[in-house]
């Protein structure tokens, strides 16, 4: 097998055993990126030179025998995590030339664990979208079907991992932005509990919903990355102060006695039939692994989309006020301050970002706060307590990650509401703050399908364990996208 | 018609913490532009605020010193608006759950002590500083461009909002002086208006006396001293009454005090609906204060000016006026008490010296009383020397100056200059005989009824003793001599 | 829930967005659709429900009042679109 196709766990073992050097691994990966990137466009910035420098430094250290969890392994970073001296754009014209003077905590932790940053991945502009089509720097293609979207907003991270352009990637998830692209690209994506991973340096979309998380080839890789990423950060006041234990070891425990809830609201009319069939098959598989499946109900799920599209744009409209052309980012000149503000923001933001700023400004504006924002925060409590109640009966929940597999480019861009509906199964998880993972569980018309496991707060271990046992018992994760086809497409692009 | 002015004040006070409200940047004033700035207070994408514990403590102290109820449950909110000095396009402030509510401040007014209600005191971050340049530089409405310095951005502020309980410029002035004094006492702010650590906006309206309907209120800004506050408010009251008497409407607007023209003028600003879109700050968690903690802060408060004033009146038999002048400055009050401790017999005498000669010198030297060479024990000893007739009050004045300049004990000065008062009747008698002989004509005038020359003879007698004769004795003995 | 043209203009002004006529039209329609969808929340009786700002109960996350290094002025200004003598420069405010 080619070096790039190994998992994060496998390659880091090989490097630490000196079977291969970090420089060799990195050089190989850069060649592979060159061959595939024109087709996929997973990256906004490939940091080849910096990565090689870091790999060289790592190899020197590696001789001394220190051990690192991610020793010398190239990892991709969603371009909304700040990286010191590396352009961080959020896929927006607004930040096209923004070079942060500091590094996000999550990225810092990757580097401290020996990880090598290979590049900054493409995404929906300011993480607002479910298809990576709103990026100012152009769309990313789905490695499984180049006519389809990779999902979003962490589409570049998902496609880079699926197409072996990185051993793992960091994504962020506000309403499904890790899990939905992971499902569309046939990889593993974990949205941790709110507060589990520091948000410091994560360019905010919706502060009360955003979480950083791993996107990986295997469940074990996700657990390994959680060992690196999770933990209290004094720079983030909402960072959870909970004890963190190893996520990898507990994966191996069998699932006997595990109680898994199946919420009926996640099996809706209009769902793709192959998706439905795959999920049902997965449920049977889980039963065979010793799990007890329990039908449960989360009746307020249907309100989660409304709640989300009030809370997220409201917070975003405030979070995005700072892009005003004064301190950093784009400035479009005007005769006076206000003109400069308006011209800068109108030319710097894309249509979807503007739409959400408008929506959020409206729902917060005088006279409407009670009707929208306050109401949404109340329903948020109902949704949260509903999860709390269900989790008294079961250890975790199983649902599809998305109602359909990856859709074609342009299919949903005309109707914002239809695009928003693509997140219907992932959104309530962010509203409740609980963790959830998406893992591959089959195919629909040769496009991957994702299985979502939802856990109790701060019990990532449980869903990782279920995901791992399921993954090991099926072959679904061993299928790969057709890299030859991607390389061919790339040649034509050039 | 008889009009009554109604005034409410909003005072912003910078808290004297070492670091800013949400980041570790220093708050020192007067540093080169944009050198006390970090990713957090520059509002760089992805940065997050973390509350400075000291700011909470200081804000609670302000609340308690102003008789507020400190909230056991409060939170921070975002106030959204665009302005170049506001790096995140929102100010982290407090909206519906401020840290302190329902306090009051007592001021002395023409009608005696008056209680001014304080509606709320909330914690928030300061904005950066704008310098208007080009064109008519320094004036917002005539400049070509502005320069932004974020050193001040993020410094903790409390906003103290009074009820509209003030009825004159004088009362506003009283309120501000008392407020400043309290804040200085509890040590939470420098209250330096020139450096912007205390800023005041006034809401002024007038209405017919006795009417329960309030007039249209005008916000007056840009008053950078208490004196200007008073002048601006007084001007504004006159302006509004004149308009009403001319049957002209009062416009709801913001005006600023123009120091050069001594009047308020309309602030030119982009007409803007104030729609701040407040919502709870998702990046910060609630502030929950236990009543034990609040009690602890309350106990840690020093004696406040009003209490101290009462105690001075009682313990030292001072007049209300004297006590007020002394407690007006915490250092002076402390200095005074040290002096009284050294010589408790004549607290009033010490007070007189402090409010007279010492105050004059302090005024001239503009320094902290504790930085002077003269110490409390020195003044105590001086008063004691006078009381014991060792020196005359006239001598004392000279000795005081010497003490002030050299920091020597008065006894040392008396000794080295041989200034001890002559209380020996024989010596004084000799001097009197000498003067009566020398000025026999004037003595005749006195004896023929011209009383006014008596002082001249006393002076001459004292002069004859090199100024050392006890004036009281000279007086008495001379009188006895002449009246024989 | 129909948004009016004037409301969209007002919101755009608050948000400092310069919108073309076409944008105003399309946002008016799109936002109206979304807001209409949100009317479903009116079905719920929320009278006794407390709003939830933070999903997990946390309180009093404070920092010690200890000075930490600021960034050098050069780094603070490095991304500034227009910078003059150590300051960020903005066009005339009025
Ligand atoms: Mg304020
Ligand atoms: Zn700072």
Image: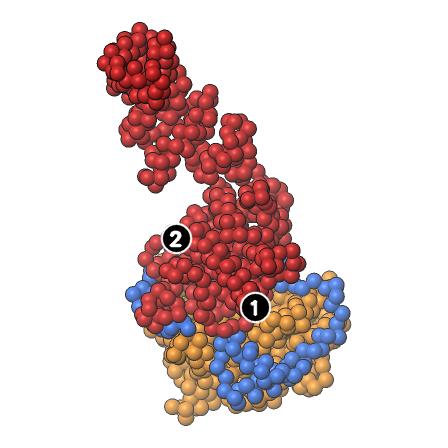
Chain colours: A orange, B red, C blue
Residue occupied by mark 2:
B194
Say above or below: A449 vs B241: below
Say above or below: B410 vs A442: above
Question: Which residue is the extreme one toward the top?
Answer: B426
Residue occupied by mark 1:
B247
Is residue A42 in view from this perspective?
no
Could you tell me residue A428's position as x and y percent?
A: 65, 72
Badge 1 vs badge 2, beta-carbon distance below 8 Å = no
Judged left or right of residue A297, residue A321 is: left
Q: Nearer the viewer, mark 1 or mark 2?
A: 1
Few, some or many residues within 10 Å of mark 1 (<14, 14–19, 20+): few
Decide which of tag 1 and tag 2 comes sooner along the chain. 2
Is residue B483 in view from this perspective?
yes
Image quarter (top left, top right, bottom left or bottom right) of the C terminus of chain A = bottom left
The residue located at (43%, 47%) in the rendering is B190
Residue C28 vs residue A474, the one in the foreground: C28
Question: Which residue is the extreme one toward the left?
Answer: B438
- Name the image quarter holding residue A131: bottom right
Cα separation between marks 1 and 2: 39 Å
- Name the image quarter holding residue B98: bottom right
The residue located at (44%, 65%) in the rendering is B265
Judged left or right of residue A468, residue B320 is: left
């Amino acid at each position: 097998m080619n070096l790039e196709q190994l998992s994060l766990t496998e390659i880091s073992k090989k490097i630490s055993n000196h079977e291969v050097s970090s420089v060799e691994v990195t050089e190989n990966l850069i060649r592979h990126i060159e061959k595939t990137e024109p087709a996929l466009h997973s990256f906004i910035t490939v940091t080849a030179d910096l990565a090689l420098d870091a790999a060289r430094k790592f190899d020197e250290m590696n001789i001394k025998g220190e051990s690192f969890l991610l020793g010398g392994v190239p990892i991709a970073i969603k371009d909304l995590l700040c990286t010191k001296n590396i352009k961080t754009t959020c896929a927006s014209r607004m930040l096209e030339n923004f070079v942060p003077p500091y590094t996000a905590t999550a990225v810092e932790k990757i580097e401290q664990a020996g990880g090598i940053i290979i590049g900054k991945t493409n995404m929906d502009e300011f993480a607002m979208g479910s298809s990576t089509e709103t990026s100012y720097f152009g769309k990313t293609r789905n490695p499984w079907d180049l006519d389809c979207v990779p999902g979003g907003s962490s589409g570049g991270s998902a496609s880079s991992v699926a197409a072996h352009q990185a051993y793992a990637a960091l994504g962020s998830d506000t309403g499904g932005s890790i899990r939905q692209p992971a499902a569309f690209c046939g990889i593993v994506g974990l949205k941790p509990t709110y507060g589990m991973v520091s948000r410091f340096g994560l360019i905010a979309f919706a502060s009360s919903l955003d979480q950083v998380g791993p996107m990986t080839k295997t469940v074990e890789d996700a657990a390994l990355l959680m060992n690196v990423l999770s933990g209290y950060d004094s720079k983030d006041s909402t960072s959870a102060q909970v004890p963190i234990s190893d996520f990898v070891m507990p994966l191996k425990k069998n699932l006997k006695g595990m109680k898994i809830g199946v919420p009926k609201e996640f099996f809706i009319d209009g769902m793709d039939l192959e998706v439905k069939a795959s999920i049902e098959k997965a449920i049977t598989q889980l039963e065979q692994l010793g799990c007890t499946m329990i039908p449960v109900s989360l009746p307020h799920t249907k309100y989660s989309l409304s709640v989300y599209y009030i809370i997220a744009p409201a917070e975003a409209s405030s979070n995005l006020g700072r892009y005003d052309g004064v301190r950093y980012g784009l400035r479009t000149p005007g005769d006076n301050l206000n003109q400069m503000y308006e011209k800068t923001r109108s030319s710097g933001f894309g249509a979807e970002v503007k739409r959400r700023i408008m929506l959020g400004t409206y729902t917060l504006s005088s006279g409407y706060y009670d009707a929208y924002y306050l109401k949404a925060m109340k329903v948020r409590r109902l949704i949260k307590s509903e999860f709390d109640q269900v989790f008294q009966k079961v250890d975790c929940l199983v649902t599809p990650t998305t109602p359909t597999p990856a859709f074609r480019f342009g299919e949903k861009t005309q109707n914002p509401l239809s695009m928003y509906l693509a997140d219907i199964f992932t959104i309530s998880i962010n509203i409740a703050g609980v963790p959830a993972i998406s893992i591959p569980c089959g195919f629909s018309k040769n496009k991957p399908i994702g299985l979502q496991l939802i856990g109790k707060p701060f019990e990532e271990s449980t869903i990782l364990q279920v995901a791992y046992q399921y993954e090991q018992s099926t072959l679904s994760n061993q299928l790969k996208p057709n890299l030859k086809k991607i390389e061919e497409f790339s040649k034509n692009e050039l | 018609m008889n009009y009554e002015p109604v005034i409410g004040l909003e005072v912003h006070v910078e808290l004297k913490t070492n670091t800013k409200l949400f980041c570790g940047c220093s708050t020192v004033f007067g540093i080169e532009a944009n050198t006390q700035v970090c990713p957090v207070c520059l509002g760089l994408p992805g940065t997050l605020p973390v509350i400075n514990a000291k700011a909470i403590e200081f804000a609670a102290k302000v609340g308690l010193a102003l008789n507020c109820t400190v909230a056991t449950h409060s939170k921070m909110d975002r106030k959204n608006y665009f302005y170049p000095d506001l790096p995140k396009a929102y100010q982290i402030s407090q909206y519906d759950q401020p840290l302190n509510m329902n306090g009051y401040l007592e001021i002395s007014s023409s009608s005696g002590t008056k209680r001014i209600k304080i509606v709320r005191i909330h914690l928030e971050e300061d904005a950066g500083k704008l310098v208007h340049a080009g064109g008519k530089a320094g004036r917002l409405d005539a400049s070509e461009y502005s320069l932004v310095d974020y050193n001040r951005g993020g410094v903790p502020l409390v906003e103290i909002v009074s009820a509209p309980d003030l009825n004159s410029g004088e009362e506003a002035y009283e309120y501000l002086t008392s407020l400043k004094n309290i804040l200085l006492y509890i040590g939470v702010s420098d209250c330096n208006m020139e450096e912007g650590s205390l800023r005041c906006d006034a809401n002024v309206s007038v209405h017919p006396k006795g009417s329960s309907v309030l007039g249209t209120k005008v916000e007056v800004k840009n008053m950078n001293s208490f004196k200007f506050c008073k002048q601006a408010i007084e001007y504004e009251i006159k302006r509004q009454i004149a308009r009403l008497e001319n049957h002209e409407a009062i416009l709801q607007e913001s005006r600023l005090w123009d120091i050069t023209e001594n009047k308020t003028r309309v602030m030119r600003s982009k007409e803007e609906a104030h729609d701040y879109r407040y919502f709870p700050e998702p990046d910060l968690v609630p502030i929950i204060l236990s009543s034990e903690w609040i009690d602890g802060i309350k106990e840690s408060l020093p004696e406040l000016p009003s209490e101290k004033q009462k105690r001075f009146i009682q313990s030292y038999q001072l007049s209300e006026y004297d006590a007020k002048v002394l407690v007006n400055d915490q250092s002076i009050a402390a200095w005074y008490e040290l002096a009284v401790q050294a010589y408790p017999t004549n607290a009033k005498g010490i007070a007189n010296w402090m409010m007279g000669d010492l105050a004059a010198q302090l005024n001239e030297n503009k320094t902290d009383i504790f930085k002077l060479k003269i110490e409390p024990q020195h003044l105590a000893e001086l008063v004691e020397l006078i009381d014991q007739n060792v020196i005359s009050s006239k001598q004392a004045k000279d000795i005081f100056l010497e003490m002030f300049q050299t920091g020597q004990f008065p006894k040392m000065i008396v000794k080295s200059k041989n200034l001890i008062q002559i209380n020996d009747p024989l010596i004084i008698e000799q001097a009197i005989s000498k003067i009566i002989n020398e000025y026999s004509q004037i003595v005749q005038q006195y004896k023929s009824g011209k009383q006014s020359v008596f002082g001249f003879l006393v002076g001459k007698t004292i002069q004859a003793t090199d100024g050392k004769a006890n004036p009281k004795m000279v007086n008495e003995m001379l009188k006895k001599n002449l009246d024989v | 829930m129909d948004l009016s043209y004037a409301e969209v203009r007002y919101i755009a002004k608050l948000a400092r967005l310069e919108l073309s006529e076409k944008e105003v039209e399309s946002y008016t329609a799109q936002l109206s659709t979304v807001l209409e969808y949100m009317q479903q929340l009116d079905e719920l009786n929320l009278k006794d429900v407390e709003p939830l700002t933070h999903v997990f109960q946390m309180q009093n996350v404070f920092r010690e009042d200890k000075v930490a290094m600021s960034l050098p002025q050069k780094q603070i200004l490095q991304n500034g679109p227009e910078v003059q003598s150590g300051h960020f420069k903005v066009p005339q405010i009025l």
